[in-house]
Image (spheres, rainbow, N blue to C red):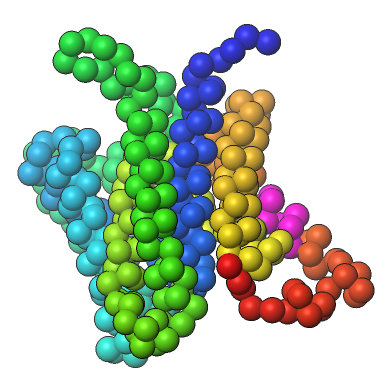
Amino acid sequence: MTFDSNAFLIILTGTLIAISCGFLGVFMMLRKMSMTGDAISHAVLPGIVIGYFVSGSQRSLEVIIGAGLLGILATLMIEGLRKKAKVQLDASIGITFTLLFAIGIILINMFAYKVDLDQECVLYGEIAYLPIDLWITKSGLNLGPRITWLAGLNLLFVGVFIYLLFKELVLTSFDENFSSVMGIPAKGVNLALMSMVSYTTVSSFESVGAILVVALLAVPPATAFLWTKSLNSLLKLTAALAILISVLGYYLAFWMDSSIAGMMVTVAGGFFLASALIKGKKPSWFKGTPKESKPLGI
């Protein structure tokens, strides 16, 4: 069997993105905010459009900054509706992302005759095209796929972020009031987490699509949670699932001549359903032990 560099790059990029989303998704799940990633992936559309108008390019720093600011705005709106207006969390998420997404569509329609930008090109991507989107320096040096570099940089940012704020993320995820008593700015930590989710979402869905990003934020952590109640083990198992999802998703898509991103989501869903069935059919002597009934620990 010959080495396929394109397959390797696609799997590597998918793995980097899956691990980044999975790590952030663990803390989103613990906060019962997994679907906030879905809201952010749609709410950033106005920021992408404005950034495009300013720079004239879909791949500029202005686009990422605009999307990041809209992600933060979406987070503030969700929290404001939930705490100030006493709206349920699921309702506040639905109101926020539909409103901002609609504003983005209006901006696109208003200026469609001036710019080459539509909903599909900013919200949906296909990871199969990754090998042809190369990063070539001014001197002509080919550094490989641009998205692979972005995915690696994003994983580095996520890793450093979690390493530096691990204690704060744990405390604010389990007991926000207690963390405030301990002197930890819970709102600031939450805003930092949402900002990182915004950046990860924006930097990832250009290549793999918004659906895959949202799935990777929610499904691997939820699957890992069925098997372990230890936070460190939860993070490790989520990373392992991310690797399996990327590898199996690619080769199944290749075998069935289907969408790679779509197959990765399908594989992730398959892992979750299989885990739920296995854990649900455990014999009575294997469940309900004092060890398993303990709260999630580090």
Task: Look at 22% across and 46% down and name the residue there.
Answer: 64
* Count of numbered marks: 0
Indicate whether residue 145 is drawn in magenta.
no
Residue 298, how many percent across, how many down? 58, 67
Q: Is residue 64 left or right of residue 169?
A: left
Q: Give the range drawn in magenta.
A: 269-276
Q: In this view, does 220 lie above or below 169?
A: above
Task: Look at 57% across and 48% down and name the residue there.
Answer: 239
Task: Look at 69% across and 51% down and name the residue there.
Answer: 271
Q: In this view, does 145 lie above or below 22?
A: above
Residue 119, how many percent across, how many down? 29, 46
Along the line of sight, the residue nearer the viewer: 108 or 33 = 33
Q: Is residue 92 left or right of residue 227?
A: left
Within the image, what quadrant is residue 292 found in?
Answer: bottom right
Q: Is residue 160 left or right of residue 43?
A: right
Q: Is residue 223 above or below residue 74?
A: above
Along the line of sight, the residue nearer the viewer: 173 or 148 = 173
Task: Look at 79% across and 64% down and name the residue there.
Answer: 279
